[in-house]
Amino acid sequence: MSFDLDHHGDAEVGAGLIDLAVNVRHQAMPGWLADPIAASLGSLSAYPDERGATAAVAARHRRDPAEVLLTAGAAQAFVLLAQALRGARRPVVVHPQFTEPEAALRNAGHEVERVILREADGFRLDPGLVPEDADLVFVGNPTNPTSVLHPAADVAKLARPGRVLVVDEAFADTTFRAGAPGEPESLAERRDLPGLVVLRSLTKTWGLAGLRIGYALGPADLLRRLAAARPLWAVSTPALAAAAACASPVAVAAEREIAGALAAERAHLVEQLRRVPSVTVPGDPASAFVAVRVPGAQDVRADLRKRGYAVRRGDTFPGLGPDWLRIAVRDTATTDRFVQTLSEVIEERP
């Protein structure tokens, strides 16, 4: 079965539609973030200087600045990895997950092997499924589109000498566990695992998709190889200002507060979806979106569009298929209206 690996949720959104297809938070930008970005516009005559933002990100994750590489969105890091590691003999992508890693690998000429996690297991990671001789492995945590948060110990079992393990933590800042500090199951501060590269995005929680800012964390020697594959001045001055601001203690505290509120909104969405006949929500969703299986999902999606709602098709994700949709978590009032509409659409189907 072929998959449209280049399809993304923004293609689902149209004028007049309520956006449940894109996993970007829609709230207004806080002043501590908006002000530095606005102020940076006065410095656009100078070439970007990454040192301050790099140091700020390194301090947040208790790393040396040499272990941080800023990128134009986390997606750029997939391309850099695919280009810089062309010598990989057996690259493996763990699916279902964000399709951009596989697309980047294929575009760079790699022959990609897929490891498919099962719905029956809640799409949980089984480290034993990854071939022992795989020397480049990509896995998401939490995983887009399934919203599964794998135990850090299971992900860490994939690391070994001679292998580059890439963990896409683009949505790690959306996760929350009551009574536990920080981001549950994140490997961003682990420096003891050989070949570990952690990718992060600042576009989701802070609504910066159009600014393009993310970063890679990993061994300094490996990041130097990625840096050599980057275009010159790859990250703009406003994006650097955003990176520094989002690494501040104020930002981290705000992020945890947002993640806590999101957890309640997500729980409400899951509870309501599980009450809809013929809708299945597998596993234990942990991020800013929920994957659902519903018979005739493509027709359901089309009917939802007619009634004003955009949701993400699931048939472009290896490991899912035509009976899947991905739904972004929104406020409870929006959720209630959407689920009522979804129920009506399904009830009216022949």
Image: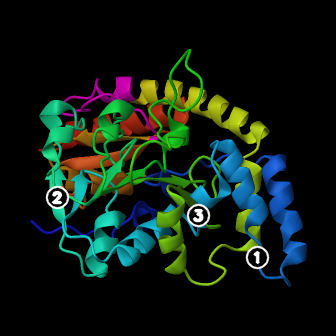
Mark pair 1, 2: CA separation: 38 Å
Asked if residue 276 lies in the magenta stretch, the reply is yes
Among numbered discs 3 and 1, the one appearing first in the sequence = 1
The extreme left residue here reads 1
Residue bearing the label numbered 3: 69
Look at 49% across and 80% down and name the residue there: 229
Name which residue type carries label 2.
Arg
Q: Mark 1 highlights which residue? A: 48
Q: In the figure, is residue 50 to the left or right of 289?
A: right
Residue 333 percent coordinates (x, y): 54, 31
The local crowd at label 3, few if under 14, some if 14 to 19, many if 20 or more residues have their Cα within 10 Å, is many
Q: Looking at the image, which is closer to me, 229 or 183?
A: 229
**Residue depicted at 47% across the width and 55% down the height:** 22
Q: Secondary structure at mark 3?
A: strand
List x then y, in percent, for residue 3: 19, 67
Residue highlighted by disc 2: 114
User: Alpha-carbon neighbours of circle 2 within 10 Å: few (<14), some, or many (≥20)?
Assistant: some
| Quadrant of the frame with the C terminus | top left
